[in-house]
Amino acid sequence: MKKLMLILLMAVTTFGAAYSQTSIAHVNTQKVLDTMPSRMSAMKELENFERRAVKELQETQQKLQADYSKLQQEKPTMSPTAFKFEEERLMKKSQEFQTRQQELDEQIQILSQELNAPILKTVQDAIAKVCKAEKINYVIDESSLLYSGGRDITTIVVKEVLEMEKAAAAKATSGE
């Protein structure tokens, strides 16, 4: 019985010591992302691509609507067969428009993922570096917190991210 109590006491003591050494902090990743020059340029590139895609789709849709209106005006002077052929041609163009719309949506998603992947990796690397330097075991994003009274490392992570981006920019301009 004494051995069991001794083992139980050692287990509780070990768990308590391990628990007391655990360090938890939180970070506002959105704030970190908002300070990154690379994120700002990625967002600008994505917005430009989206703007061109929307313009293309609007022009195509306007042309389709104009062609359909013209067909409706010419319907009384057309034979039923000619009208049917023209209507089928416009329906085919409408289907091509929908296909193109889906393609552009997919391209926007792919571009967004490609542009954001290195940015998110930089944030993760910066958080890992800060955690190692500050001896932090766990970091929680503020967006998933219900209550935040703990240690906020956002400012430290922002500084680290900016330093990492500056170093990456210097490396890129030096041709390495």
Image (cartoon, rainbow, N blue to C red):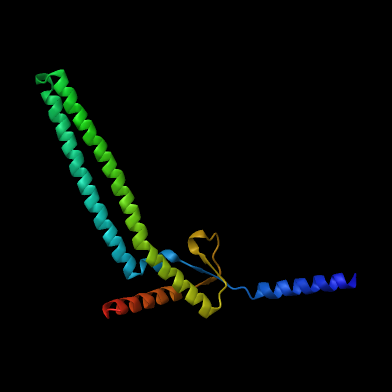
Does residue 74 lie above or below 125 as drawn?
Answer: above
Residue, far left: 77
Q: Going 15% across and 34% down the picture, which residue do you hit?
A: 66
Height in image: 163 above or below 100? below
Return the x and y of residue 7 as percentages of the image width and height.
82, 72
Identified at 86% across, 70% down, the residue is: 4
Q: Quadrant of residue 84?
A: top left
Q: Position of residue 94 (x, y in %)?
A: 24, 35
The reply to whether residue 154 is visible in this rendering is no
Q: Is residue 144 above or below residue 164?
A: above
| Whether residue 142 can be seen here | yes
Q: Residue at x 31, y 52 (%)?
A: 107
Quadrant of res 114: bottom left
Count of marks, rendered view: 0
Q: Nearer the viewer, residue 117 or 2?
A: 117
Q: Quadrant of the N terminus?
A: bottom right
Specify the quadrant that holds the C terminus. bottom left
x then y, percent, for residue 48: 24, 57
Q: Residue furthest right?
A: 1
Image position of 71 (left or right of 141): left
Query: Could you tell whether 17 is left or right of 108 in the image?
Result: right
Corner quadrant of residue 36: bottom left
Side of 43 where 66 appears, left or right = left
